[in-house]
């Protein structure tokens, strides 16, 4: 549970920092206010998919002990976080290019797509682990059963 709390906190900091970067970088480069750039999307992706979703997972972990399936939970955690980080990094890269007036390319979109695929795969693994925890299909570890 501590890993979820720490990751959520890091995403909160990254989300706030990316919002600050978005605001200041666009001002510094005289980017027209209101014109679209993916920098704003990075801010919301980090806060929503990182900070808020992981807080919800933390609450579900507290209630259902999802990590009793440690392999599934580890797969979820690493796939999901890799996806959020990869997607957000590509949003920042693409948004920075937009603000600087440079062209993006298909590689950035492709890598962002891989990030979204990893997020989706992580969520599927999470729901498998959650279903096992809710339906009681996961054995309770000996130390938890003794409590």
Image (cartoon, rainbow, N blue to C red):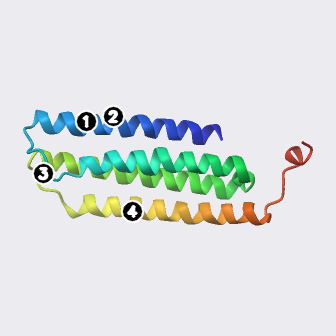
Q: Which residue is mark 4?
A: 114
Near mark 3 (Cα within 10 A), the count class, few <14, some 14-19 or many ≥20, is few
Q: Which residue is mark 3?
A: 35
Closer to the chain start, of discs 3 and 2, is 2
Near mark 4 (Cα within 10 A), the count class, few <14, some 14-19 or many ≥20, is some
- Locate the C terminus by quadrant: top right
Residue found 79% across the figure and 66% down from its top: 137
Q: Are marks 2 and 1 in contact (CB under 8 Å)?
A: yes
Residue found 40% across the figure and 58% down from its top: 115
Q: Nearer the viewer, mark 2 or mark 4?
A: 2
Across and down, in percent, residue 82 comes to: 46, 51
Closer to the chain start, of discs 2 and 4, is 2
Q: How far separated are the C-alphas under marks 2 and 1?
A: 6 Å
Q: Nearer the viewer, mark 3 or mark 1?
A: 3
Q: How far separated are the C-alphas under marks 3 and 1?
A: 16 Å
Q: How far separated are the C-alphas under marks 3 and 2?
A: 20 Å
Q: Which residue is mark 1?
A: 21
């Amino acid at each position: 549970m501590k890993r979820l709390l720490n990751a959520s906190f890091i995403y909160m900091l990254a989300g706030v920092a990316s919002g600050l970067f978005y605001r200041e970088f666009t001002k510094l480069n005289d980017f027209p206010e209101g014109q679209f750039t993916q920098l704003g999307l990075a801010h919301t992706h980090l806060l929503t998919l990182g900070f808020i979703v992981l807080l919800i997972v933390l609450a579900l972990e507290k209630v259902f002990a999802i990590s009793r399936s440690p392999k599934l939970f580890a797969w979820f955690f690493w796939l999901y976080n890799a996806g959020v980080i990869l997607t957000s990094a590509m949003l920042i890269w693409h948004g920075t290019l937009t603000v600087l007036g440079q062209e993006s390319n298909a590689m950035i979109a492709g890598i962002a797509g891989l990030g979204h695929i990893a997020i989706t795969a992580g969520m599927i693994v999470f729901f498998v682990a959650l279903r096992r925890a809710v339906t009681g299909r996961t054995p309770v570890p000996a130390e938890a059963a003794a409590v």
